[in-house]
Image: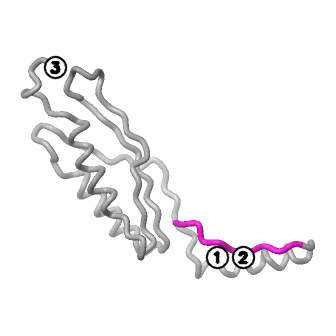
Amino acid sequence: GVNHADGASAIQALAHKVIKLHALTDYAAGITTNVGLISGGTSSNTVAPSATAKLDVRFIELRQWDEILSAVQSIVAEEELPGTSARLLEATTFLPMEARHSTELLSIYQGLAQELGFSVEGEFTGG
């Protein structure tokens, strides 16, 4: 568009952040990060003045949360392009149901299910 060189694309800045946020995924540690929704800009012939993204973070142990949150906050705080900034808004936080805490609950559930004549198995489904 007009004055392209004078603009700072929020979408471009966000794209850099998405790559860094996805790089926080550590399958061995049970940590996944996924930017699953992105929106921004006003038209294809203007430099995007704003952009938003929704990030899903999953982890398996509560002790991991502070480090993950700190890493996310650091990425959000970085100025990817001159003239751009970002902020983090926590929408919903679901803490992990750690295996060490859920084993007893699963055992009770399995016992009750057996009394009713059926079998239930536990399955790890992520953070």
Report the amino acid beneath label 2: Leu
Q: Which residue is mark 2?
A: 106
Instruction: Report x, y in % for residue 71.
Output: 28, 63
> Taking 118 as reference, is 125 left or right?
left
> Answer yes or no: do the residues labelled 1 and 2 have beta carbons within 8 Å?
yes
In the rendered image, the vertical position of residue 65 relative to residue 10, given as above or below: below
Q: Position of residue 12 (x, y in %)?
A: 22, 39
On screen, residue 102 above or below 3: below
Going by the numbered disc 1, the residue's amino acid type is Ser
Residue that appears at 29% across and 27% down: 41
What span is in magenta?
118-127
Where on the picture, by quarter, is residue 26?
A: bottom left
Residue drawn 51% across and 64% down?
95
- Left or right, 52 with respect to 100, comes to left
The residue singled out by tag 3 in the image is: 1
Quadrant housing the N terminus: top left
User: Looking at the picture, how far across and down is residue 81, in whole percent?
Assistant: 13, 42
In the rendered structure, find residue 102 and report the number of the disc placed on it: 1
Nearest-to-viewer mark from 2 and 3 = 3
> Distance between the Cα atoms at labels 1 and 3?
56 Å
Mark 1 vs 3, N-terminal side: 3
The answer to which of marks 2 and 3 sits earlier in the sequence is 3
Q: Say whether residue 71 is magenta.
A: no
The numbered dot on residue 86 is: none
